[in-house]
Image: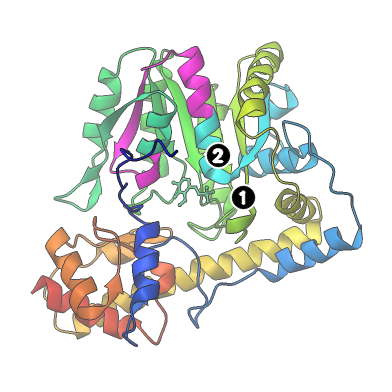
Amino acid sequence: GSSWAAVPMGPPDAILGLVEAFKADTDPRKVNLSVGAYRDGEGKPWVLPSVRKAEERVMAKMMDKEYLPIVGDMAFVDCARKFALGKESKALAEKRVASVQTLSGTGSCRVIGDFYARFLGKGAAMYLPAPSWGNHANIFKDSGLEIKTYRYWNKQTNGLDLDGMLADLQAAPDGSAVLLHACAHNPTGVDPTPEQWKTICKALKARPGLSLFFDSAYQGFASGDAEADSFAVRYFVSEGVPIALAQSFAKNFGLYGERVGSLNVVCETAEEAERVLSQLKIIIRPMYSNPPAHGARIVGTVLSDPALETQWRSECKMMADRIIAMRTALHSEVLKAGSKKDWSHITSQIGMFCFTGLKPDQVARMTNEFHIYLTKDGRISMAGLNSKNVAYVASAMHECTK
Ligand code: PLP
């Protein structure tokens, strides 16, 4: 018989649970600002034409459906790491980067989490920014790490708490791991400036006992320029600081459900990179054996064809620009609605999200009275806004913060 009589009902996922509630809502005014997926000006999911074109080329090749190697599609992986680190990267030329394809960004986080649990030791600390993407803590806890946080968001200024961040990282014990968002910090939309990144890099370079992990889920999506968005990662590597790097192609290529990502561990020597790679394979093999081929072939096709890559860059910029335009619109509409509050953070933040500053009771009103769905921390996905709903959302934000 079943032994599961004592299994308790688990809570719904904090973000994906909202999608279910939104679907069940029959109010015609309903707006979904919960999940971080791009929507076009009509509120519809958008497949990038460059991605469609690459997909057609992949299909035309009539390739077989054999397993990929444990490390994935190496042609994709090589394009992906050049995309992040730069085609001229010295670390790549010196063959000291261990890279594998992963199940998008989430899978990349999980593989490095397991690697840290093995080689820093079970229960080693993983320092996350406060706040961070909701799934980070769950991933690294399940890997066997102990979650700690460092100060990041300054409530008073709606900006970066650089001093708090540096003090907390300074105090982190050797043998800990530290997660940094490469760009477009989720959920706050607040990134260090290049000058602040240099300060952070200097402080962390002086702490070789810490293992640094960049999570890059929005390269190109933040500013519209994939080169500018990789500043922090490239700066740390150019300073000779060993890092690990997760790449997701969910948002910037709009390949959410295809699960395209990679994990790169920048090592000190080529020989070290070989040893690290051997261990990544040992972690991956019993976990999911090998990654899916289709999406990786699409990204590999785009990034290895200069014309397609140029087209992708302009389409990625289009997405970023529409989001920036929605920030301007939301800001002006909330003032037009009569709010006397300071909403300048709507336009100063970058990336997919706006951290509105709405309190949990205000968020509850937004959903219960106005049928607008957002996460409890007050985060809204800017991509869910368009010219038809932005004034409605702005007036609701004003009503709930009066
Ligand atoms: N990391 C961050 C900071 C994210 O915001 C996300 C997605 O929301 C991810 C990783 C992972 O997304 P995916 O697994 O779809 O690539």
147 lies above or below 279: below
Residue 64, how many percent across, how many down?
A: 89, 49
Q: Which residue is drawn at the image coordinates 36% and 72% (left, top)?
A: 22
Queried whether the magenta region covers residue 221, the answer comes back as no
Q: Which residue is mark 2?
A: 107
Write down the region rendered in magenta: 112-136
Query: Is residue 388 left or right of 41 when viewed as pictured?
Result: left
Residues at marks 2 and 1, CA–CA distance in whole angstroms = 9 Å
Pointer 2 with pointer 1, Cβ within 8 A: yes
Helix, strand or loop at mark 2: helix
Residue 259, visible in the rendered structure: yes
171 lies above or below 11: above
Identify the image quadrant of the C terminus. Answer: bottom left
As drawn, which residue projects farthest toward the left? 402
Query: Is residue 378 left or right of 79 when viewed as pictured?
Result: left
Q: Which residue is mark 1?
A: 259
Q: Which residue is drawn at the image coordinates 43% and 36% (left, top)?
A: 139
- Report if the beta carbon of the residue with label 1 is closer than 8 angstroms to ligand 1: yes
Q: Mark number for residue 322?
A: none
199 lies above or below 261: above
Amino acid type assigned to the residue bearing label 2 in the image: Gly
Amino acid type assigned to the residue bearing label 1 in the image: Arg
Pointer 2: residues within 10 angstroms few (<14), some, or many (20+)?
many
Query: Is residue 88 left or right of 190 when viewed as pictured?
Result: right
